Amino acid sequence: MSGNTGTQGGRGRLGSMLSGLAVAVGCLLFLGGFVGGALIYQPYTVPTDSMTPTIDDGSKILAQRIDGDDVRRGDVVVFKDPLWGDSPMVKRVAGVGGDTVACCDRDGRLTVDGKAVVEPYLTPGMGGRTVASDKEFSVTVPQGSLFLLGDDRHTSLDSRTHLEEAGQGSVPRSTVVGRVDAVVWPANGLLEPPTGFADLPGGTSRPGPFEALFTAIVAGCVLILAGAAYGPVANLLTRRSAGARPGKRERVGA
């Protein structure tokens, strides 16, 4: 009896220690993921349908806080320029300082310094033909600036709308407040990489740590729940085991 009780007590202490460790590690992961996300990302609500089908009107997005100097072609950015309005806006970077951005080539594609850019997110317009813009243009982007386009080229009010203004519709890099990494509502996850811009000088940006932070939060939840559930489950199993154990028969003296 004493040996069995000692064994069960040892296992119980080990289990309690492991469950406590699981809860502690889970809390660190969960809180670390949330705190890291709050420091790195800023949530926004997209106010228009100019970025459909990539981002729908009313979607909740997470934009990584970055410096405007870190922006590359193909990035979807949140920016705030007083000449465009008082609210933050979301557009895709089509060109950076020094680029000549033009539309369209004979296949209806956008070109950057004469190189055609494949944009799979574009949708067909009237007549079923997909073109990068229904308005022809050719712009040399000033140094330190960005040329921005919406993914819905049929309705988006973007740099094309401001071609007659200073900078021909470009905005300073300093107006950028974040780079969009993910759509969290509806839960579409990470944006598709802008592969059409990958072959241009400088390449494209890498996604931020959204997936790592999300994984940490989920793993933390699992560990906390598993550790918290150990005690009640262990007690229930012990009671069932004790109830199923047959009692000793009394010895009858001669």
Image: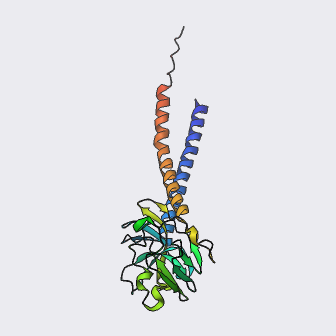
Residue beneath the point at 44% across and 79% down: 135
| In the foreground, 36 or 10 | 36
Q: Quadrant of the N terminus?
A: top right
Q: Can residue 71 be spotted in the picture?
A: no
Q: Is residue 134 above or below residue 56?
A: below
Relative image position of residue 203 (x, y in whole percent)? 62, 74
Give the residue displayed 48% in from the left and 44% down from the top: 231
Q: Is residue 89 above or below residue 37?
A: below
Q: Please, is residue 248 above or below residue 203 in the view?
A: above
Count of marks, rendered view: 0
- Residue 54, x across and y down, in percent: 45, 66
Q: Quadrant of the C terminus?
A: top right
| Quarter where residue 87 is shown | bottom left
Residue 240 visible at all: yes
* Residue at the image position 53 percent from the left and 74 percent from the top: 106
**Along the line of sight, the residue nearer the viewer: 224 or 207:** 207
The type of colouring in the image is rainbow
Horizontal and vertical percent position of residue 5: 57, 34
Q: Position of residue 219 (x, y in %)?
A: 53, 54
Residue placed furthest toward the top: 254
